[in-house]
Amino acid sequence: MRTDDDVTPRLAADAAVTAGLLDSGRPLAWASGMMLLVTAVVWLKGHPVHLPALVGTVVMASLQGFLAQRVRFDAGIFRLWASRWHHPLAPAADLAAFDVRVGRQTPPAASVEADLAERRRGAIRLLMWQAACATLQLGLTVIALWP
């Protein structure tokens, strides 16, 4: 998977933009944690809650926390790639080394551009799942605490 000199800066820019977008998962994780904390404090102070919705809130917060860690990891990887890709062979070598290290067992893509585009789509899907879990957590929190 060789790249042209003209493509490498664009790949680095794409990786940097993806890292920046994935950083938006941090405020979601913080809001989810604070929402769970407030819910727990209100419940421990004796406010009546709907138990199934409270359990759903905890489950969604846990799932959102897992996804937040994964999104944070991906943001760091994309940021690293963006900072390293100044040589035409760097993207292909970095992607191959990453695949070996994490045990990724997918067939090689036709080009580095296609490979990075697939990885970007996957990372953004994780961010969307994280946002969906945080939204569901908010809805379940309202249901749990509604009198």
Image (spheres, rainbow, N blue to C red):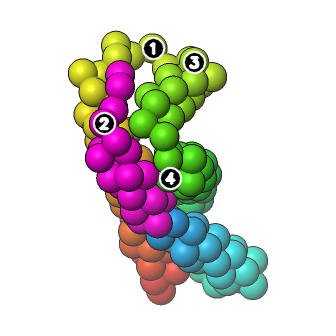
Nearer-N-terminus badge (4/2)? 2
Label 3 and label 1: CA atoms lie apart by 8 Å
User: Residue at the front extreme?
Assistant: 5
122 or 42: nearer the viewer: 122
Label 1 and label 2: CA atoms lie apart by 26 Å
Label of residue 105 in the image = 1
Amino acid type of the residue tagged 1 in the rendering: Gln
Q: Quadrant of residue 133?
A: bottom left
Q: Which residue is mark 3?
A: 100
Label 4 and label 3: CA atoms lie apart by 19 Å
Amino acid type of the residue tagged 2 in the rendering: Asp
Nearer-N-terminus badge (4/3)? 4
The label nearer to you, 3 versus 1, is 3
Task: Provide residue 128's location: percent of width, then percent of height.
Answer: 35, 57
Amino acid type of the residue tagged 4 in the rendering: Ala
Quadrant of the image containing the N terminus:
top left
Nearer-N-terminus badge (3/1)? 3
The label nearer to you, 1 versus 2, is 2
Task: Provide residue 16's location: percent of width, then percent of height.
Answer: 45, 59
Nearer-N-terminus badge (1/2)? 2
Amino acid type of the residue tagged 3 in the rendering: Val
Answer few, some or many: residues within 10 Å of disc 1's Cα (few below 14, many 20 plus, some between 14 and 19): few
Q: Which residue is mark 4?
A: 82
74 or 116: nearer the viewer: 116
The label nearer to you, 4 versus 3, is 4
Circles 4 and 2: CB atoms closer than 8 Å: no
Task: Provide residue 117's location: percent of width, then percent of height.
Answer: 29, 41
Residue 50 in view in this figure = no
Magenta region: 1-22
Q: Secondary structure at mark 2?
A: loop
Label of residue 4 in the image = 2
